[in-house]
Amino acid sequence: MIDLSTVGPASRCTAALRDLGATVTKVLAPEGKQIEPPFFAYGAGRGMTTVRVDLKSDEGRDRFMDLAAESDVLVESYRPGVAKRLGIDYESVRKITERIVYVSISGYGQGGPYSAWAGHDLNYLAVGGFLGTQGRRPDAGPAIPGATIADGAGGGLHAALSLCAALFDRERTGRGTYLDVSTTEGVLHLMALFVDEYLATGRETGPGTSLLTGKYACYDVYECADGKWISVGAIEPQFFANLCRALGREELAPSQMDDARQDEIRTAFREAFRERPRDEWVHELAPIDTCVAPVLSIAEVSRDEHLNARGAFVDAEHPEHGAFRQVGPVLAGGKRA
């Protein structure tokens, strides 16, 4: 697999596939001619080969085509039209190898009114409907996510899934294909629960208007005595009843979805959770079917006993920076069924 990306959804795609066994060659511009991610990013140090090629020169283009001729997959994330100007677009590569699965990953897709727009994760989340549902109140503005959801899940994983399907199809037909992956459309699929509801019923979801966007006290976060936070996702009535009982407010259980009592329930929960530190609450509540979990900082995530027991982190090696830990494959060898 040839990877022409440096950051963003395309790099998420190729990193995921490399973890699943793909041989990936990352083709970069000559040093100093493009912005590259820090040494620890995108699963670095886990077996990806890097070559530097000047695609603007005839010699570099010829070298690239030699690599393409020996590859099953090519992934690029240029702005629409750039690959064609460089002479390495799908039609050009297809002349060298008809079996190539050529994947173009962009923000808005190769065609359409927005296709030429520059953008980043936040922009794709905005157009895909994600940002419009975030925040505590409609008048406070959308909350900025603390993760690159569009790049990772919207673009990267959707591209990886489409790519695998294309390779499977090629095994049956012997033909390669071209994939136009829009990161924004990946976000749209992540938002399908709300978008499909609107298309079918006309009901529009926004901040604080539905169960999943903060309308009800049973699905919220609460501050504890030590200033740390706990998440509550007690959607099912039996889980909510368990929580109310454990907090000493069993009388609130029948009013879980009573709109008129949500402020009262939230106040009761806030007062209860502020009486003890977060980890004490988690230790007591999590084992008794209350759907609670700690809100962990990044440092706490790296030390979390469950994630470490599951082998969620691996060791990597960089030729200049040495050994370091990083997030490992979603499906490591020991976790496959």
Image: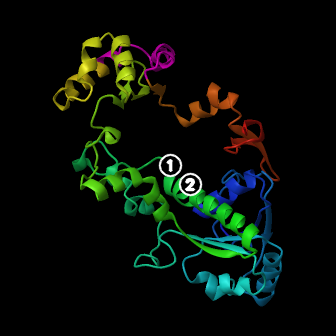
* Label 2 secondary element: helix
Residue 28: image x %, image y %? 72, 71
Which residue was labeled with disc 2?
152
Image: 104 above or below 139: below
Q: Main secondary structure of the magenta part?
A: helix
Residue nearest the viewer, comparing 322 with 230? 230
For mark 1, does the 10 Å Cα neighbourhood hold few (<14), some (14 to 19), or many (20 or more) residues? few
Q: Residue at x 68, y 31 (%)?
A: 310
Quarter-of-image position of residue 35? bottom right
* Label 1 secondary element: loop
Residue 220: image x %, image y %? 35, 32
Asked if the magenta segment contains residue 276, the reply would be: yes
Residue 9 visible somewhere in the drawing: yes
Q: Give the magenta-colored segment's residue range.
A: 271-290
Residue 146: image x %, image y %? 47, 46
Q: How is the image coloured?
A: rainbow
Query: Which mark sits nearer the N-terminus, 2 or 1?
Result: 1
Q: Residue at x 76, y 84 (%)?
A: 61
Q: Look at label 2 and name its amino acid.
A: Gly
CB contact under 8 Å: marks 2 and 1: yes
Image: 215 above or below 82: above
